[in-house]
Image: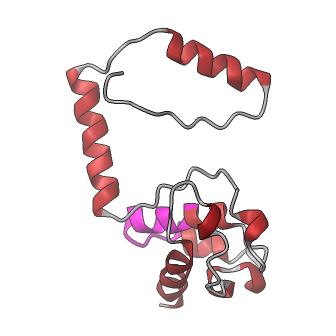
Amino acid sequence: MPEVTVVLSGMSNMEQLKENIHTFTEDKPLDEKEMGELLSIAGEMLEKNILPCTACRYCVSHCPKGLNIPELLELYNEDSFTGGGFIAPMALMAVPEEKQPSACIGCRSCEAVCPQQIKISQAMGDFAKKMEK
């Protein structure tokens, strides 16, 4: 695809490696309809401040509070994308208080290793405030 210059593909087993090789063996660009759909979804995500977390988990080992940051960011994104539905608040009810977004101390250790350069501490603070309502 001429529009793609870099692909970050986390792989953890041989099957995933084979899938990636197969996917990129054929150089088939998106057609006009596919490109339009992709741009439409990307536009929606940008409008709703969806965070580009790839769940690489580099941040997790750097969090002194042991927060499951990718899971929390996924819930943050779900809440943002749906405009404040019920899934994120309900899912957070199963998360112990000491592992909630409000437990983030804002040290930013996680941000130093985030390949997506996400402002994680800011997102945790914003998410905690949203969930208080």
Question: How was the colour assigned to the protein in this rendering?
Answer: secondary structure
Secondary structure mostly seen in magenta is: helix
Q: Quadrant of residue 95?
A: bottom right
Quadrant assignment for the N terminus: top left
Q: Identify the residue at image location x=77%, y=85%.
A: 98
Tell me if residue 86 comes above or below residue 74 in the rendering: below
How many marks are shown on the rendered structure? 0
Tell me if residue 6 comes above or below residue 114 in the rendering: above
Measuring from the top left, give residue 118's x and y in whole percent: 50, 65
Measuring from the top left, give residue 37's x and y in whole percent: 27, 35
Q: Is residue 104 magenta?
A: no
Q: Is residue 78 magenta?
A: yes
Measuring from the top left, give residue 64's x and y in whole percent: 78, 78
The extreme front residue here reads 112
Measuring from the top left, give residue 80's x and y in whole percent: 41, 67
Q: Identify the residue at image location x=67%, y=74%.
A: 109
Q: Quadrant of residue 88?
A: bottom right
Tell me if residue 43 comes above or below residue 14 in the rendering: below
Q: Identify the residue at image location x=55%, y=37%.
A: 8
Tell me if residue 94 comes above or below residue 16 in the rendering: below
Q: Which residues are magenta?
A: 74-87
Instruction: Looking at the picture, tell me which residue is in the foreground, 37 or 104.
Output: 104
The extreme top residue here reads 26
Instruction: Looking at the picture, tell me which residue is in the foreground, 107 or 69.
Output: 107
Instruction: Looking at the picture, tell me which residue is in the foreground, 52 or 79.
Output: 52
